[in-house]
Amino acid sequence: MMRAAITAVAGFLPENIVTNFDLEKIIETTDEWITTRTGIKQRHLENDPTRATSDMCVEAVNLLCKKRGIHPEEIDLLICGTVTPDLVFPSTANIISAKVGAKNAWSYDISAACSGFIFALTTGAQFIETGRYKKVVIVGADMMSRIIDYKDRTTCVIFGDGAGAVLLEPNSEDLGIMDFVLHADGNGANYLHMKAGGSLKPASHETVENKMHFVHQEGQAVFKHAVYNMAEVSARIMQRNNLTDKDVNWLAAHQANKRIIDATSERMGLAKEKVMMNIERYGNTTAGTIPLLLWDYESQLKKGDTIILAAFGGGFTWGSVYLKWAYDGSMVGK
Ligand code: UT7
């Protein structure tokens, strides 16, 4: 069977950094609260109002092509996981493809919030496994600062902006995506959503005045579902592939809250050194977190490493992906 393997990874973060101490000046919070409750110390927030999610993705995709030594015209398909598209339509993936000159690609977005990257990755992998395509780019990106109320301390401390991208190519050495378990439950919508801006409540004076274009999150309820489901699905994918903690080299889990990641790694029985973590520097970049983790840890990844990706997010959506890394990351420059 031809597998879909990640053959390159790249990322982008806006230059502007906002620390917990900066937030202390605008809302009633403390560095101590944010650090102990979430693990976050700072986040990157785009402060140029003319830039949008696609601009971050363009930087990541251009770097991706440069690293792999390919021209964007070689890309067959580009999928973008995001809940902060540039526009309601057309898709951000289309805009990215046009901006990078991926003239031969067709493209579309996947809306699965924090699970957007793994939903897009597993979808894109199907086109490689069937033999239809040779080069599929998967982007996970969100400019969360555009839908966050910086007067709401329960959400604004958590989120950040960022984009990550990977290239999928065919692999005949039994490396790449081995298995995945994905779930969605629309009954969770009430706990994490944006109240207006869609066909249910189009933008109006009323929706703007009532702050209905910002993220609404019932933190504790989401936390409970996230802890249970991310740990459960990660343990399950190990079980059904007969993997023990010794077989797993890395966990790349969605970076929403350090306590959720710790609970997942404990359930999997993994040592701390095997858990990728960058939440302290980037916060929760929604669909961006997992590709950004792979980008940050790339130099430590060896050919054949077993990696479990895990995510939980709005929808609810959640799942795990079992993959075998296909190249020696230490040989690749940033
Ligand atoms: O990424 C997609 C999915 N999202 C998640 O996975 C997020 C899941 N949820 C969480 O990570 C956590 O629920 C939060 C980080 C959002 C909140 O942490 P928590 O430990 O669940 O806090 P809480 O909501 O139970 O609030 C505890 C207290 C409250 O005060 P009282 O009522 O006990 O007096 C809050 O008002 O902390 C207060 N609080 C804050 N205090 C200082 C809430 N936000 C802040 C803040 N600074 N930023």
Image (cartoon, rainbow, N blue to C red):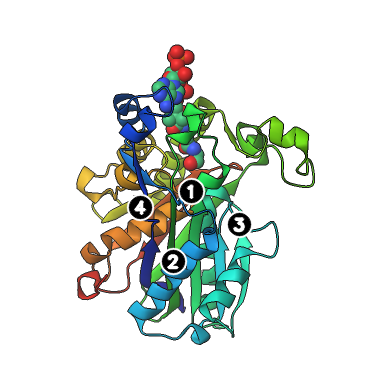
Could you tell me if the residues under marks 3 and 1 are in contact, i.e. CB atoms within 8 Å? Answer: no
Q: CA distance from mark 3 to mark 1?
A: 12 Å
Nearest the eye: 165 or 24: 24
Mark 3 / mark 1, whichever is N-terminal: 3
| The residue carrying mark 1 has its beta carbon less than 8 Å from ligand 1 | yes
Left or right: residue 199 versus residue 312 is right
Q: Which residue is mark 4?
A: 252
Residue at image point 23% right, 68% down: 302
| The residue carrying mark 2 has its beta carbon less than 8 Å from ligand 1 | no
* Quadrant housing the C terminus: bottom left
Q: Which residue is mark 1?
A: 286
Q: Position of residue 81 (x, y in %)?
A: 55, 59
Mark 4 / mark 2, whichever is N-terminal: 2
Q: Which residue is mark 3?
A: 85
Nearest the eye: 312 or 17: 17
Q: Crowdedness of circle 2 by 10 Å Cα count: few (<14), some, many (20+)?
A: many
**What type is the residue that disc 2 sits on?**
Ala
Is residue 170 shown above or below 49?
A: below
Quarter assignment of residue 11: bottom left
In front of the other: label 4 or label 1?
1
Q: CA distance from mark 2 to mark 3?
A: 16 Å
Q: Which residue is mark 2?
A: 165
Q: Is residue 164 visible?
A: yes
In front of the other: label 4 or label 2?
2
Q: Crowdedness of circle 4 by 10 Å Cα count: few (<14), some, many (20+)?
A: many
**What type is the residue that disc 3 sits on?**
Pro
**Callout 3 secondary element:** loop
Could you tell me if the residues under marks 4 and 2 are in contact, i.e. CB atoms within 8 Å? Answer: no
Could you tell me if the residues under marks 2 and 1 are in contact, i.e. CB atoms within 8 Å? Answer: no
The total number of labels drawn is 4
Q: CA distance from mark 4 to mark 3?
A: 24 Å
Residue at image point 49% right, 80% down: 135
